[in-house]
Every structure is written in C-alpha cells, then in structure tokens.
Amino acid sequence: MLVDGQPYRTIWPHGDSVRIIDQRHLPFRFVIAELRSVSDTATAIREMQVRGAGLIGAAAAWGMWFAARESGGDESSLRRLAETLFATRPTAVNLRWAIDRQLAAIQSAADPVEAAHASAMAIAEEDAQACRQIGEHGLPLIRAIAETKHDGKPVQILTHCNAGWLAFVDYGSATAPIYAAHDSGIPVHVWVDETRPRNQGARLTAWELSRHGVPHTVIPDNAGGHLMQHGLVDLVITGSDRTTRTGDVANKIGTYLKALAAKDNHVPFYVALPSSTFDWTARNGITEIPIEQRSGEEVRWLDGEDAQGEIIAIRLFEEHSPAVNYAFDVTPNRLVTGLITERGQCPATEEGILQLFPECRAGRANSGT
Amino acid sequence: MLVDGQPYRTIWPHGDSVRIIDQRHLPFRFVIAELRSVSDTATAIREMQVRGAGLIGAAAAWGMWFAARESGGDESSLRRLAETLFATRPTAVNLRWAIDRQLAAIQSAADPVEAAHASAMAIAEEDAQACRQIGEHGLPLIRAIAETKHDGKPVQILTHCNAGWLAFVDYGSATAPIYAAHDSGIPVHVWVDETRPRNQGARLTAWELSRHGVPHTVIPDNAGGHLMQHGLVDLVITGSDRTTRTGDVANKIGTYLKALAAKDNHVPFYVALPSSTFDWTARNGITEIPIEQRSGEEVRWLDGEDAQGEIIAIRLFEEHSPAVNYAFDVTPNRLVTGLITERGQCPATEEGILQLFPECRAGRANSGT
C-alpha cells in the first residue's frame, strides 16, 4: 500500500538480508529495519517489530531462509533454528505453518538455500494475493449494507487491533474489504478500537486508514458496546491469529467482548482470514489454543510522543500493583456470523469451512493455498 | 480509609473552605486541594479532581454551601449557581439529587448559609454510612463463594473503574464488600480493569487496594472475558453513576461489555450503589439516561510517570485520527444478577427495588436516605 505516495509492503528481501517496517515506531516514526539472521528474525517477531498473523508467517518464512544458510545443510541444526523461530509467539498458527512449509521445501531441495528463498517469496506473494481476494469476497457485504442506506451515510464498521496491511504482507485481512469498498466509492467510516495494552488499533490501524484516506475514529476498547446499543455500528470485521476447523476464533484480547456485544445488538460479526490461519487440527478453541501471556510491564508502561515530539515511555500505575497480559482470547463460533477467506465467505462451522476447503476434510493437512 | 497510616475522607470542610484529595495526581502524588467558591467546585467536578457517584454528590452539596454564601439570599442568583454546578457532569444523578436537597434546605431555612453547611455535612455523613452498610450487605455474597472453595484459594472479584472510597466520601460502593471481606479474614483477590480512557482502575482502585493491603492485579479492559471463560472470576461487582427504577445501570463505559461476558460465563454480576444513585423517574436506561461525551483528547493524551519520576503527558496517536469519548454506558437490567444497597440486596427489577424502597412506589420522590 502507499506511504506518502510510495508503494510499500511490510517485508521484502534486499540482497543478502530482509527489510521490514519496524512497527514499534509507528505512527510517530517510519523506520525501515534490516534482518540478517535467524536471531534477528526471532527478535523482530518476539519484540513485535513485525506482528500480525500473515506478517509473522512471512517473517518466519524469511527466517527459515536464514536458517537454511546458517545450518549449512545440517538437519539437526536446521530443526534447532526452526524451534527458535517457533518459540517466539505461541498463538500464531501462521508461524508453524510457514516454518513447516519451509522445512519441507528445504529438505526436498538440491539447493536448500535457494529453495528457501524461492519458497519465502512464494509465501509472501500468496499472503498478499489471499488478502486481495479476501477484499473481493468481503466487498459485497459492505455494498449490501450501503444499499440499505438511503441517506448517503457511511457504512459504520468496527474493527479491533490491527488486521490491516501492516499485519500481513499487503492489503490486510479485516481491512481488505474496507479498502476495496472505499476504493470503489462506497462511503465507509471505521471505528478503530485502540486495543490495549499495545494499542495496535490507535497506532497502526488508524495510521494505515489515515494514509489511505479512509474516514475513521479512534475509540477506547470500552466503547464498542455503547456504540452498538445506539445503532452506530453496522458491521464488525476482525482478523484472527488462529481459527479452529470448527470456526472458533483466537484473536487479539478483547475480540470476544465485541463479539458478545455484536450478538446482543444484532450486529453482524465477521472474521477475515487467509486459510493459512486455520488450525485444521483443533476443534475447541477455548481448550485447545494456547494463549500467549506477555509481560505485565506492557500494561504498566506505554510510550508515545510528548509535547516536544520526543518518544517517551510512561508508567501508568504503581509497582505495588501487579499486572497480567494475555495477548489473545477466543471467540466461540456461535458468536461469529461468518468467515471471509480467499476462497469466499462461509459460516463459522466445520461443515461451512470444509465446503470451501474440501481437501482438509481428512484432518491434519494444511490447505497450502 | 487509611493513607500511609492517616485516616482520610475524600472531602471535608476546613474553616471557610472545603478540602479535597485532588485525584488527578494519584497514584503518583498525594495532593490536597482547597475549594473556596462555586466556581472552584464546578471546576473540580468538571476536571475530575473529584469524581465518582457519591463524591460528586458530596462536592455539589458543599458547592451549594458556597452558592448560599455567594447568592446573598437572592433566589435567582442561587438557582444560577446551582445550574453551574449541575452542568458539570450530566450523567451523575447524585449531582442533581444533592443540589435539589440543598435547594430545599436553603429555601426553608432562617439562616441559609448555616443550613447549607449542616445539610452538606449530613449528605457527606450519610454517603459514608450508606457505603459502610453496602459493605455489610455485600459481605455474605463473598463469604458464600469463599465457603465453596475448599482449597483456601481467594475469591476472585472483577471490578471496573473506581467505585472505591475515592469515588465516595468513604468505604466505596463496589469496594465496600471487598474491604469488609478482606477485613474479616476472607481471602480475596481483585482483578482491576484499568478503565480507559482515564484509567481510574489502574490509577485509583489499584492505589486504594494496595494501600489497604488487598491482593489485586491490574488488567487491560480487554481481558475480563478471557478470564471469565477460564473460570478465573467468581464475581463481578461494579458501581453505578445512575440506575433506573427498573434496574438499568449507567456506569463507566465498558461496564456493559463485562456484564455480557459475565452472563455468557454464568458469573454473578452485582452492582453496588447507595439509594442516592437511583433515578426514580427513569424506566429505560438506554433511551432515558443522558450519556456524557467528553473530549477525544482524553483518549489521545495520557499522563504518567517517566523513568525519572516526572509526570509527563504523551500523545498515543496522530492528530490525523479523530477520537470520541463516551464516559458511560448502560447495562440492561437483564444482565444484572442483583443490586447491593444500604438497605440490603435486591433483584435488578422495578418490583425488587421497590420492595426495598417502598416510599418510592409513587414515582418522582427521592428516597432521601
């Protein structure tokens, strides 16, 4: 997507290294960082220089290119490096998916390093194309709501966290239908949950939308229920970090609360995801999906720009008070109106999902699209 | 309650003026401020030097003492000053209640200033006593849960915002049963919602609980649903800024989302309030209770302590992105397990409430307790 008129993706190869937008500095600074090793890549994922379902997968794919180089053809060393990458973010299923796909590509290749490079390129490109297709498949939803409005008022869409192009290689998942609608002239307005504790909504989604010219308003995470009670939300679209084959959705902590409010107020609640985000082995999201617990210091400390434009971290409450920080929660499929994937929309049920992905009926296999 | 071993209330007369704990500086600084006029009092309420249902009422009562002095017996001037106070926080029903009670006291008195002083003293004292009684009536709830735990584990209570002693004259509403349980040796642990955008949970409730030695953990507002899904919350208790005669509860924005999660996970959801918080004229909370909209800058900017211990305000997102800031939402009575008042517990229904407050069956009259 465009940043100040320049087209960017979130990650791209550059000679012997890989470049990323270092998202920790957004929206205040636009910083490009360079990754040169598995260790750099693991740090970038763990410290959230890169984050978001698709981008974590793409970063891990490029990390496996470094792993192929660093292991020098030694199988056990390759597996150790893969484990280093896998340990960074336990909830993100795209991480495992990308690493497994790279392991298979590397192990069957005459030139493992070249194979890993080609496969990373393919994973990144497929991610971008899947998001573009999610946009196409979600657009009719927004258009249908727009057609019920006879006063030219915008379609009001609420989103949580950042499932925008910054969370993928390009386009985004939850934002793809929004960008598609905006670009085709449908008036939209986005309620952007700030998404504590790391504020990816206020920092990343708002930045993306403003750079693309999409009308939006930042709200505290507490506000969505009130807006829905008063008819100010037509549609909720979020992303997902892992979705079971039965349609239970792990996503940023707080998503479940918005899904409950949507249900209580008859607001459609959609989840947009590329098929790489499905965990075909899991049936019960609440009991089977591991939820990453991050440091409570991410709740206690927050950074932003002071009145002089300097980036400062402040402590929000005292050291006497402990804090906990669960990164994700699970929204049961009964609260999800539908899923939007690169193959089309489907109900959040095992049968609905398998009709779109019949090759996954048997169980463990990943769709590979 | 105690602050570093000293007993304090949140507001008290001091010669010709009134002293308050200036809550904007907590938890980092303990600052006592002095109010000398209606204008000082209105500013203190509007700028949230004092906040919370009961304390707003007590502050308005003391403000009316200033109004009696400043109006010099002129009726229309008195009413204008009362309006100045009333305009500060439109959702808080205790504000109107305290002002109306003071107007009646002043108008029927031989010495209006002395009458206003005596009535303000009474309002503050009644507020403290009502909260103490809420503690007594809520304690059996917590004790009953403790008795179901055979492993000595604490009763896990989630609360939103600050309905602690800082929100009243003393004891608090939601916290009163918690303090009563803790003081009688029942192990409790409190999940403290940080409560964006003004973080009254992280700043005030956590400070109160830590000063009193009650175990607690600060969580982002997004986390409560996840905790309830995993059996980590036994009970939710919140306060209220206005409750209809039918039991719809206006409280800090985000309360409704926690009530939905409590319902979805079979967790009891109680609201603790003194009867001065009932709006006996309102039947439908969602359509009849005005919801205060505050500046979006309260969402964009946040202050805290930097690494050097200086209080610094930081901007969380760009000026390109607008923000809105609804201060309260309404939890429909169907989501409320029960109310805890100074007269006892009751169901959140008109009949349940009127059985405790039979003198309010007729309609408009306030219970005056």
Image (cartoon, coloured by chain):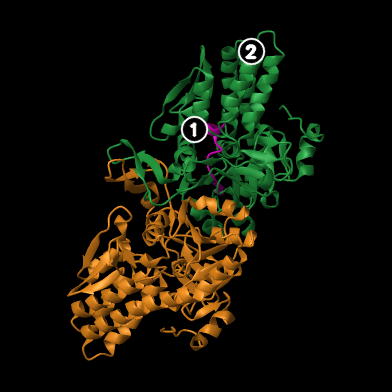
Chain colours: A green, B orange
Find numbered disc 2 in the image and state the secondary structure of the residue it sits on. loop
Give the residue type at disc 1: Met
Secondary element at tag 1: loop
The residue to which callout 2 is attached is: A74
Establish if A74 lies above or below A219.
above
Three-letter amino acid code at the position of disc 2: Asp
Inspect the magenta stretch and tell me whether residue A167 lies in it.
yes
The residue under label 1 is: A48
Name the residue located 48 percent from the left edge and 81 percent from the top edge: B343
Q: Quadrant of the C terminus of chain B?
A: bottom left
Q: Nearer the viewer, mark 2 or mark 1?
A: 2
Q: B72 or A359: which is nearer to us?
A: A359
Report crowding for label 2: few under 14, some 14 to 19, many 20 or more residues within 10 A (C-alpha): few
In this picture, residue A2 sits left or right of residue B320:
right
Q: Does residue B287 appear in this view?
A: no
Along the viewing direction, whichever of A193 and A235 lies nearer the viewer = A193
Number of on-image labels = 2
- Mark-to-mark CA distance, 2 and 1: 29 Å
Q: Chain of mark 2?
A: A
The residue at 49%/88% (across/down) is: B359
Q: Is residue A342 magenta?
A: no
